[in-house]
Image (cartoon, rainbow, N blue to C red):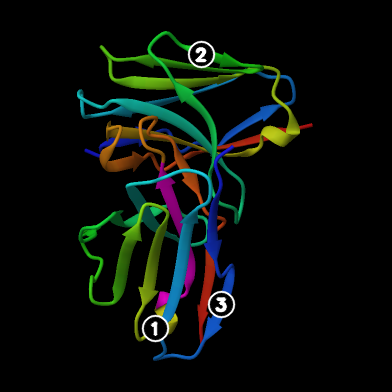
Amino acid sequence: RKEVEQDPGPFNVPEGATVAFNCTYSNSASQSFFWYRQDCRKEPKLLMSVYSSGNEDGRFTAQLNRASQYISLLIRDSKLSDSATYLCVVNGNTNAGKSTFGDGTTLTVKP
Amino acid sequence: GAVVSQHPSWVICKSGTSVKIECRSLDFQATTMFWYRQFPKQSLMLMATSNEGSKATYEQGVEKDKFLINHASLTLSTLTVTSAHPEDSSFYICSARRINTGELFFGEGSRLTVL
């Protein structure tokens, strides 16, 4: 079993749709969690950190469920520009060791 | 926001030569940096974890003598691809982890083509 697992998709949705991605992790002691976005042939960019209380940034909402060991990303009112690959990242220890990536979920938003 | 500079962005070299790629965190300190490679339409593959002042930790299957990593300061890590061959052609990306937040910031990547 992979340490961090994501549904690879692809997710194909119309503009304006709401889409949700989940990411599960195996290390129950993991300390910090993030969502990144990667466009084709570009480096990943930090989208948002994920906190236990949940956090929202405009159309994006991230949630952490420690009991079930998953994090989620919700995108409301999808835009064409949201088309990208979304990666979840889990740190076993915030200041040491490895940051583990999921393989990414590909989202395509269509007109 | 935090900036990580990776250089060079593009490099074309002959088979058998060595190529050095630099990764610098410009406005924060990073005790840990990571090196990845990514083939087209595939996910990031972690090659090694670079720790400031100590030896890098390599992932299984990554040859440490071929991919030399040096992390001499809190803001600089280098990856040297030694005796490069065409199969080493790939997109190499570094990331730096900011102390205390755990956030990763990525360099823009280096596209290596070995002829």
Under circle 1, the secondary element is loop
The residue lying at 73 percent from left, 20 percent from top is A16
The amino acid on which the numbered mark 1 sits, given as a three-letter code, is Ala
**Residues at discs 1 and 2 in contact (Cβ within 8 Å):** no
Q: Position of residue B37 (x, y in %)?
A: 42, 61
Q: Residue furthest right?
A: A111
Q: Within the magenta stretch, is there residue B94?
A: yes
Query: Can see residue B43?
Result: no
In the picture of the structure, the residue carrying the numbered disc 1 is B84
The amino acid on which the numbered mark 2 sits, given as a three-letter code, is Asn
Q: Which residues are magenta?
A: B88-97
Within 10 Å of disc 1 (Cα), the crowding (few <14, some 14-19, many 20+) is many
Under circle 3, the secondary element is strand
Same chain for mark 1 and mark 3? The answer is: yes
State the mark number for residue B11: 3
Q: Position of residue A57 (x, y in %)?
A: 61, 18
The residue lying at 20 percent from left, 24 percent from top is A29
Under circle 2, the secondary element is strand
Image quarter in which the C terminus of chain A is found: top right
Query: Can see residue A102?
Result: yes
Same chain for mark 1 and mark 2? The answer is: no
The residue lying at 31 percent from left, 67 percent from top is B69
In depth, the one of A11 and A35 nearer the eye is: A35
Q: CA distance from mark 1 to mark 2?
A: 45 Å
Q: Position of residue B107 (x, y in %)?
A: 52, 54
State the mark number for residue A19: none
In the picture of the structure, the residue carrying the numbered disc 2 is A55
Q: Chain of mark 2?
A: A
